[in-house]
Image: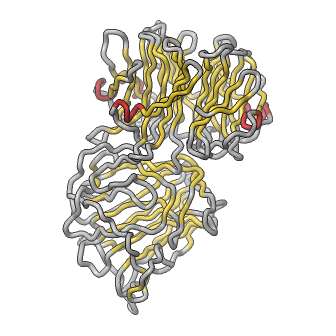
Amino acid sequence: MKRNNGNSEIGGRETRPKGARRSSVRCTGAAIPAFLGLLALATAAHSNPLGSNINNILINDCQNIDGLNVSLHVTQDMVETASQPGGGFAMQLNASPPAGNPVFWLQYGIIIQNDQARGFIQYWDNAGVNNNGEPVFLSLPSGTIAAGSVLKIALTNDSHGNVTGTTFSVTDNAGKTSTLQMPMPTYPNTTTPVLVPIEAFQVDIVGPINWENSTFSSGAGYLTYSIANGQLSVQGVSCTNADEAYWTGETSNSLYGGINPAAGSTVTQPVGTPLSGALTSLMDQSGRALQVYHLGRNSATGNLDLYQYAFHNGNWQVLDVTTAKGIPGAVLGSPVLSYENTIYNAPEAFYLAVNSAGSVQVEQLWGENWAPNSLTSLANAQPAALGSGLVGYIDSIAGTDNVFYQGTDRHVHLLTWSPGKPWKQDTTLVNTPAAAFASAMTGHMSAESEEVFYLGANQHVYELWRWSKKFDGWHSVDVTLANGSKPLAAIGSPLAGFYDAKAGTDAVFYVGTDQHVHELLFSDSDSRWEGIDATSRSEAPSVGTGSALAAHLNTTVASQEVFFVDANQNVQELWSWSTAAPEWHSSDVSMAAGDPTQATAGSPLTADINATVSPATDELYYVGVDGLVHEMWWNGSWHPGTP
């Protein structure tokens, strides 16, 4: 079966149809420094956003590429909506040999379809090489590729750079690996293998075969590319000796971020499917405005822009802050964080962007006019990891502004500011346990201490904390094991939490491997961590695949609240009165609000209190299947709204 059935035949083989040829400026042998944000065009080679069957083309200074390994690391369940018979998708490595070679295009791929994993190699020429079919090498329990899984394509080469071997593998989230070694294609009517080098390639997450399209309802992760010799970089203009004229005909709603670093023997690229962005909110007490920030795609540029929805004097106003202020867009997978800086009484927002060197930076917008700062640069701090979470808050006791992120060493790093002093990095946290790649993060102030939580590679929830007055250093706690073992977090689980001063409790929420919402509860009275299955206690539905969590205190009625999206894409609420021993109840917020627009499966969530109205209202925001930010608000009953 063919990767791409064209409309014309040459020698019995399908060829690229008209219009399937790259038509923009091609690559140089060196990377062009450029902004590498979400769908932002990382090089001059592309005039369209990166996604589907268009991704960056990578080269090794226009030399042969030896020992190429490509891996897709899944951090959020990849769920395809069965948009074609058998559902599924393919991870394609599409490559170009030197110009003038009879074989003019090379494809290697893993197909996930009909609850199976298959491998394929297809070499395109005008004579018709033998491509050895699509052998099955793994039976799957379903078509979902779970978070924690890895799909890998590994090539071997001879001394001339020719590809001589291909190994496909799928590692599940329990660490079990299934592999397939496929023989190389052969020339017609012979057993002689076709040996061809690679000089340029791209990887696409697309439909399985034959022009099929895959539509993902959930999915995120990152691609890693490594070679044995030299450095990979994004092409600028074409390598004169390589034929880079083709792309695949299969498509999807996948999106690709920038290459990080800009050049290296190993580089990384985030993948998202589909895009629902990130949400955060704050109540700007000084400006008397409720502010909701959304990282969403700018349809004109394809960039990930920061949009502000401000509720003031009874009306919503929306502004594309990125475009209005001319600030960097965000990287694919960036979180967004906001809170009021009570030291100088103005709002702040934070997100991740990429500088011209390809490093991921923590960007700050502060004040009513969103003055920009690149905090990691100002503090001469370690760059952030792709997929890093963000946590921040004001420590009113110490008088500091604190922002936490995951560095490229996978440890939590702290950037801190106080009046009259510049932003600086606290390096003492690097001695604490490492975080899982792209771990979620949450944190807050308790009565007298700073608290940060994240996930380890062992699926445990870890806490970092320190006293605000004593400053005796950071302490690390494996909360999953503290005071008795508790259920593991699901790989890629979100985290949310708060400190309830009335109840005297510290609460952190995560999604377990059973798709239940679990609470980790610390009481000031007995200084112990307790585990609570909030889903079981409330008889709530299970958490849907890829759902976020949002948690806050509803100060209008003194209750604790946690929100998530279920398998039916309805927003669900768990709530309890503010007591030291919470008694959890459940409510279908979407149904209670009159069944408004469904949430996307991987919708971000944020909750806040709108103090601009009297009496104040409880607010919940999500991204709907229409791609818009939606509001549901409560004043005794739930109501729908759209900012």
User: What is the tally of numbered marks visible in this picture?
Assistant: 0
Q: Is residue 49 visible?
A: yes
Q: Is residue 602 above or below residue 50?
A: above
The residue under the point 27% across, 40% down is 356
Q: In this view, does 323 lie above or below 142?
A: above
Q: In which quarter of the image is residue 584?
A: top right
Q: Nearer the viewer, residue 193 or 316?
A: 316
Colour mapping used in the image: secondary structure
Q: Is residue 627 above or below residue 375?
A: below
| Residue 615 image point, x, y percent | 68, 14
| Residue 271 image point, x, y percent | 46, 50
In the displayed structure, does residue 396 sit left or right of residue 602? left
The residue under the point 35% across, 85% down is 126
Outermost bottom residue: 189
The residue under the point 24% across, 45% down is 33
| Residue 190 image point, x, y percent | 38, 91
Q: In this view, does 186 lie above or below 212?
A: below
Q: Nearer the viewer, residue 218 or 276?
A: 276
The residue under the point 63% across, 38% down is 488
Q: Is residue 515 visible?
A: no
In the displayed structure, does residue 240 sit left or right of residue 189? left
| Residue 591 image point, x, y percent | 76, 37
Q: Quarter holding the C terminus?
A: top right
